[in-house]
Amino acid sequence: MKKIVVLTGAGISAESGIRTFRDSNGLWEQYRVEDVATFEAWQRNQALVIDFYNQRRKQLYEVKPNAGHLSLVELEQKYDVQIITQNVDDLHEQAGSTRVLHLHGELKKVRSTLDENLVYTLNGWELKKGDLCEKGSQLRPHIVWFGEAVPMIEPAMELSAEADIFIVIGTSLNVYPAAGLVYHVRRGTPVYLIDPHAEMLQGVENLTVFRELAGTGVPKLVKQLMESKV
């Protein structure tokens, strides 16, 4: 069974109604990254950071997977599919994808500020000041903030190197280290890039670009791969 590795970014979730950070009217226009997505921000103003992620978490309970998410599930009928996502939502899991690696954390989870290995699934959308881990420290969003290490990047690199087919969906490939995963793919491996603003990637062989939204581009590619004789 051929292995397909899929790297997804904010663009696939945007079509479900989750606002992205970098687009016009994105979240960064209302908040400075330094104020809500760094450990220094957490130390300076926990209440603001908690509220920011509570609002994002609340929104996540109001949206559903779109055609892009749902189409990827179909691939599991024929291929060994591993999704690597930069997104902190669980829309891939809601759609039915069975193997999802979250590079930047998970919005519905929280973790100890004292011990990063103590990770909990939050009951509902609201984290409160005073919610403590079993060691007595305040729980924080289970999110990789700017300036923090990305602990899942090495497993993601290994998966990328194993791919027989590599698909990139809804990402500008501007955020490292995730953007570098495409360069861990074996030379000659078919690479598909689906994004309305997609550009050709230097040094990537056998690249096919779909300059369209995930909701239309992913179903097209999935149909093509499902009908493939290989």
Image (cartoon, rainbow, N blue to C red):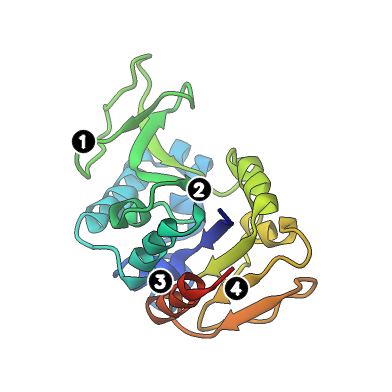
Amino acid found under the numbered disc labelled 4: Tyr
Whether label 2 touches label 1, CB < 8 Å: no
Q: Do labels 2 and 4 touch, CB within 8 Å? A: no
Question: Callout 3: helix, strand or loop?
Answer: loop
Residue at 46% of width from left, 52% of height from top? 35
Left or right of 166: which side holds 19?
left
Any part of residue 125 in sight: yes
First in sequence: mark 4 vs mark 1: 1
**Mark 1, secondary structure of its residue:** loop
Amino acid of disc 2: His
Q: Nearer the viewer, mark 3 or mark 2?
A: 2
Quadrant location of the C terminus?
Answer: bottom right
Write the residue at 40% across / 58% down.
77
Q: How would you rate the neighbour count of disc 4 (Cα within 10 Å): few for under 14, some for 14-19, many for 20 or more?
A: some
Give the residue at mark 3: 26
- Farthest residue to the front: give it: 229
Earlier along the polypeptide chain: callout 4 or callout 3? 3
Gap in angstroms between the C-alphas marked 3 and 1: 27 Å
Q: Are marks 4 and 3 in contact (CB under 8 Å)?
A: no
Query: Disc 2 marks which residue?
Result: 104
Whether residue 29 is visible to the viewer of this picture, yes or no, is no
* 10 or 58: nearer the viewer: 10
Task: State which mark lies toward you, 3 or 1.
Answer: 1
Crowding at label 3, few (<14), some or many (≥20) Cα neighbours within 10 Å?
A: few
Give the number of the disc on residue 123: 1
